[in-house]
Amino acid sequence: MAKHKIDRSIDTEILGFRIKESYKTARTNIAYSILKKGCKKVAFTSSRKDEGKTVTAMNVALALAQQVDTKVIVIECDLRRPQVHSALKLDPTPGLTNYLNNECEVGDIIKGTKLDTLKAVCYGAIPPNPSELLSSEIMTEFIQLLEKEYDYIIFDTPPIGVVIDSVPLLKHSDGVVVVVKNNSTTYPELNRTLEAIKRSGSKTLGVI
């Protein structure tokens, strides 16, 4: 019995190592896929909900922030089903929607995490008009402001196969990462998502 327990422990450690290495590989691929100076902006999306989009975005952001002299900020842009604040165990307010509605200042919504080089902006409140807020002029100005401070901006956007909220953010980004769920996401769903990204004028960096 003791031998079996040890074996299972070793298997868990190997699995954990492989997962961490996979996120580091994604980090490297993203870095080499966006060849530009200054801030790199990456949007994460999926075909539908519950495909692991937010968890993947958070882990890639963490892997990026673990690099030397690399400052990363995650923006919770899935305003219909926000998950970033839960993943990072942060208070969602004040957040993005509060700032976009001129209810607070930028410094009020940028929250620290357990890693000094990783910051986050949570959603604030569920708005009735997420598409309009995300495509607003003040949102564009907010992104431009963050570009001066951070090496990477990670947008956790809504599933593009469900709502159109993410389209303005895809246009702001330097590239899009599509998250799919093994034995769940279908090829027709994925193809429609890739076509939607192409129509938005954005670049697909890859699929995780």
Image: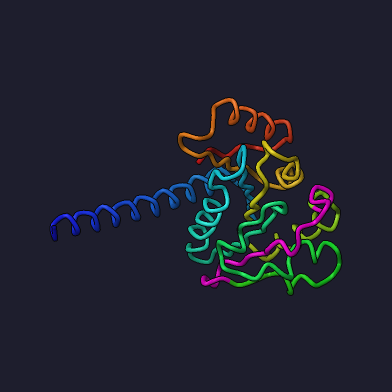
Q: Is residue 205 above or below residue 72?
A: above
* Residue 79 falls within the magenta-colored stretch: no
Q: Position of residue 163 (x, y in %)?
A: 73, 40
- Range drawn in magenta: 113-133
Q: What predominant SS class does the magenta segment belong to?
A: loop
User: Does 187 appear above or below 112?
Assistant: above
Magenta span includes 126: yes
| Residue 176, placed above or below residue 4 | above
Identify the residue shown where x is 84% and y is 49%: 132
- Give the residue at x 60% y 41%: 46
**Residue 168 in picture, x, y percent from top left:** 77, 45
Tell me the residue at 48%/65% (across/down). 68
Is 187 displayed left or right of 182 in the figure?
A: right
Which residue is rendered at x = 56% and y = 71% of the image?
A: 113
Is residue 38 visible from the viewing direction of this image? no
Q: Note whether 148 is above or below 204 in the view shown.
A: below
| Residue extending farthest front | 1
